Amino acid sequence: MTAAPLHLLGERLMLDPSGALWWPARRLLAVADLHLEKGSALAARGALVPPYNSRATLERLTRLVRLYRPERLLLLGDSFHDGKGAGRLGAAEREALAALARLTAIVWLAGNHDPGEAEEWRETPLIFRHVPRGETGEIAGHLHPKAAVSIRGTWVARACFVADSRRLLLPAFGAYTGGLDVRDPAIRLLFPRGGRVFLVGKDRLFSFPLAAVGPLSEAQPRAMSGA
Amino acid sequence: MTRPVPVPKPTLAPLPAPLAAWFARRGWQPHPHQRAVLAAVRANRSALLLAPTGAGKTLAGFLPTLADIAQTPRAGLHTLYVSPLKALAADIARNLERPIAEAGLPISIDVRTGDTDQASRRRQREAPPNILLTTPESLALLLSFPDSARLFATLRTVVVDEIHALVGTKRGDQLALCLARLGTLAPAAVRIGLSATAPFPDRLAAFLSADGRGTGVELIHAPPGAQPQIEIRLPEGPLPWSGHMGLLAAEEIYRLIRAHRSTIVFVNTRAQAELVFAALWRLNDDALPIALHHGSLARDQRLRVEAAMASGKLRAVVATSSLDLGIDWGAVDLVVQVGAPKGVSRLLQRIGRANHRWDEPSRAVLVPANRFELLECLCALDGAREGALDGDPPPPGGLDVLAQHVLGTVCAGPIHADDLYAEVTRAAPYASLSRKDFDDVVRFVEDGGYALAAYERYRRLFRDSEGRLHLADERVARRWRLNIGTIVEAPLLKVKLGRGFGGAVLGEIEEYFVSLLNPGDTFLFAGRLLRFERLRETVVECSPAQGDDPKVPAYAGGRLPLTTFLADRVRALLQDRSRWQGLPPDVAEWLELQRKRSRLPGPADLLVETFPRGGRWFLVAYCFEGRNAHQTLGMLVTRRMERMGFRPLGFVATDYVLAVWSAEEPRDIARLFDEDMLGEDLEEWMAESSLLKRTFRHVAVIAGLVERNHRGGAKTGRQVTVNTDLIYDVLRKYEPDHVLLRATRADAARGLVDVGRVALMLRRARGRIVHMALSRVSPLAVPVLLEVGKESVATGEGQDALLAEAEAAQLLAEARGEAEPPAAAPPPLRAERPVHPVHRANVARDRKRRPGGIALGTQGRATLRTIRSRRQDPLPLSE
């Protein structure tokens, strides 16, 4: 895994291929949109999808925390798929969360799907929150950005970071989180002067200008999670 | 194909008076095979009738019912008719109404399909007609209602039409399960199967039978109709080397249309249909009424074309397999098959669409589009003359369809798992279903069937103290009824002419194709040249376009695999020099040249040629196993080449050969094609492939794991969905042996990638691989080399490698100062340094020897232009 550096308002940030943000100077790790217990939310509506998404998401998160050893772990909202999600968490997943809390200080920001300890987290010169408002220095989630790139006649679509010189959007981290095309106005209007996307790969990120990405293709039916 | 006509038993009682009088008035006699069906049914036996088109199959199917009710009029459902086509059910109803009215029989008929309105559906369940005509999906729905036992209690006969088209498909699996259910609800009912002459009649009989093994089914063969008259027509000039569109023959086809009353022009893909139609239209100086018919067109338009054809208003219709089945059109006097027929049975079926009088020969013309297709046409012709039938035996039933059926059955009422198991194993596709697979499917239906028992409170079923399965909640049944069916389509978008609210819907097109269009691009659809304006939600807004440089719609699907039978024959033809005399001189010369320069593929060996060309190495394997199998093989071989250090760059698969190109010379060919690649590489490759993910999506929808995506895109805000690719990844990690993953692997292995054929081929070729290391391209390899670049699959360690390449290209462009160019233009392949340049002398000699002016039949625009200008391109093989 090779993280890519990104400079935002003079701060050096590392974008991890897992979709997390690492701020070495403040020993701060941030991830967005875990959507824990989305599986059980679907099951309640009759779609009995595999119940392993919380486990998968927490395992990946734990690996990251063991790797970076952050002092603080910021969860940028929609950590649970819905307000009652925490109550549905299984015993093993509950224990995984507790173990995580012993390794680092977790800050739960509020999302539009779940309540949190706070609406935003300010760490000058940056502001972390769930829904982006277009402010300078803002780091947000909520939109689940995803982009497709055309190469040799095929399209490869991946979740991605979107950044310009003032703000950064994180991809959704959860195992069952779909994506929103970065060409959608909801994302495009946040970057009026263009920007770059960083598509997540197995070991590294792949960077393209925002203007160079294509539409999400057949492989990616619009599966947004109501975000 | 002479089979004895069964003689009706002398004991056959006469028809009831009104029916006999009706026959007499018309001066008709029931055919012997129609009487044979009647005799079987009267003896309480089921019957499978194999008959060519026009042999009176429909009457044979209904004669027992008409006779029985005429004898003893009664209320209640007597006969259920199931057809794969809605239109066919409606048409049969109309055709039956006439004899019933004319003979004054007290018989009520009704149709129930997806188009039937709510009020009629309710009426049908409250006061059922004597004869109900329906489709497999509608039958499954009927069986899911709690009153189904009452509805079907009076059932005496089940008629399954076009049974050969259902067996071996998921719709067939669904119908077989429904028949097993009917066997429980109405054990006395007999079954009548109506089929075109087909291979594996025993399998059809098993499918029809009450025990899934063929017991109690009488096989009745109608006498074969007159031998069809089939000929092959070649376009003027030398036969093209590659291309599948067959547009060079447009003039010939047009002449044929002009010389006949009514013609069906069959093609193999929807894109080809659009192009052939456009080419004919260009030539249509006489303004003949010619129409277009394929599965992407709007339903209204298809119905209009069918109606015009039925009433004899059309001189020709260009069609895909969308017209393989269907209502009889008496007026059709010629069938043209453009491109390779891909199978003898399919060819005969298509030919049978011409001239529905079975005692007169059908007329057909085959128009091959390239040299290999000519060989295939010749072999298919021989096969058809011999009456040989081909096709693959039906695979075991899908576990996803079983899951849908299990829930549907419980919707109708509680049932014990043991009873249900006994019942479903009476359906032929599930005759050898293991109890473990069954139990896993039931567990999946109950609570998802996961090892982690997290969904106790969301159970769909519960078991009572006696072990019977009950529905947990009526909402489960409602949800099931909305998601029933076994056809899962790619996300589709409507194509509309005009903007905003007005404008006509022309049909539907795959989302994938639209994602490749930019506003202003033109494409052929529904026989028109359209200009893409914009995409609004799920509507593709278009305007009429001028000019003639279209992008062709690249519809997914529609490619038919070559049957093994036909592939073997083509291989045999290549071997048998004595048969080359019948070939056009340029084709015979081509084969002769191959024999001298390299060698011809033998009947049992596997010929592999390697040669350098244009700074790359090519490997061409003559497997003759069909495109799907070659795709799979290509993936596996390139993976192995990568490991052996040959640096493969890409490959292309046709129905006949596989061609791979690489940076290094491939050596140790026997090792490369060793059988063990199946075990070692296949699992890994399959699991990662996008193909398996797509298969999983289908399985997940059919099994009811996720909801059917009604009309792609736009979902309401409250609907929560999750991409099945994500589910697939999670499930594969935590429960690799889950029943849905097993169903997915089985599906992928049986149809889409043809692993079975690859395995057989590799086993056969063991120790018989003939490697020809050549200094230059061989004549037989020319066609596939011309396909290179048109469509090819990049190799490399998956998508990440592609992304890295795209990124590098982008960086380079930025470094050059080209500001953010669009991503569409692919960068060149890796730096291509000549590895082993071909001898200049060879090239010069090749050029000298080459006969002048070999026509290059290619796809799409090139050929459209060629038709206009009559320009004949030289074979582009100069280095």
Image: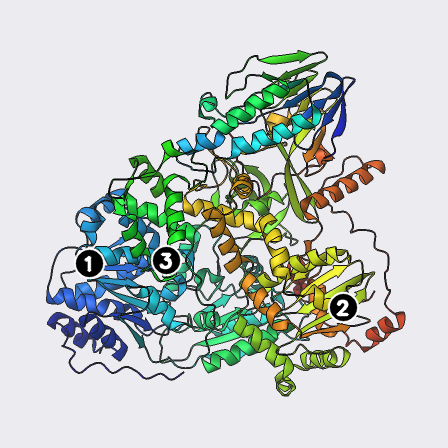
Distance Cα–Cα, label 2 vs label 3: 48 Å
Q: Give the chain of mark 2.
A: B
Task: Assess disc 2: are there few (<14), some (14-19) or many (≥20) residues with their C-alpha within 10 Å of its C-alpha.
Answer: many
Could you tell which of marks 2 and 3 lies nearer the N-terminus?
3
Quadrant containing the N terminus of chain B in the rendered view: bottom left
Q: Position of residue B470 (x, y in %)?
A: 28, 41
Q: Secondary structure at mark 3?
A: loop
**Image coordinates for residue B640, horizontal then vertical, percent:** 70, 58
Quarter residue B807 falls in: top right
Of tags 2 and 3, the one toward the viewer is: 2
Left or right for B634, reference B829: left
Indicate the amino acid at tag 1: Leu
**Mark 3 vs mark 1: which is more N-terminal?**
3
Tell me the residue at 27%/44% (across/down): B467
As measured in the structure, the alpha-carbon distance from the residue carrying label 3 to the one carrying label 1 is: 22 Å
The dot on residue B85 is 3
Give the foreground label among 3 and 1. Answer: 1
- Is residue B719 visible in this depiction of the protein? no
**Disc on res. B155:** 1
Q: Quadrant of the C terminus of chain B?
A: bottom right
Residue closer to the observer: B562 or B302: B562
- Rendered residue at 31%/69% (across/down): B214
Tell which subunit mark 1 falls on.
Answer: B
Query: Which label belongs to residue B610?
Result: 2
Sequence-wise, the earlier of marks 2 and 1 is 1
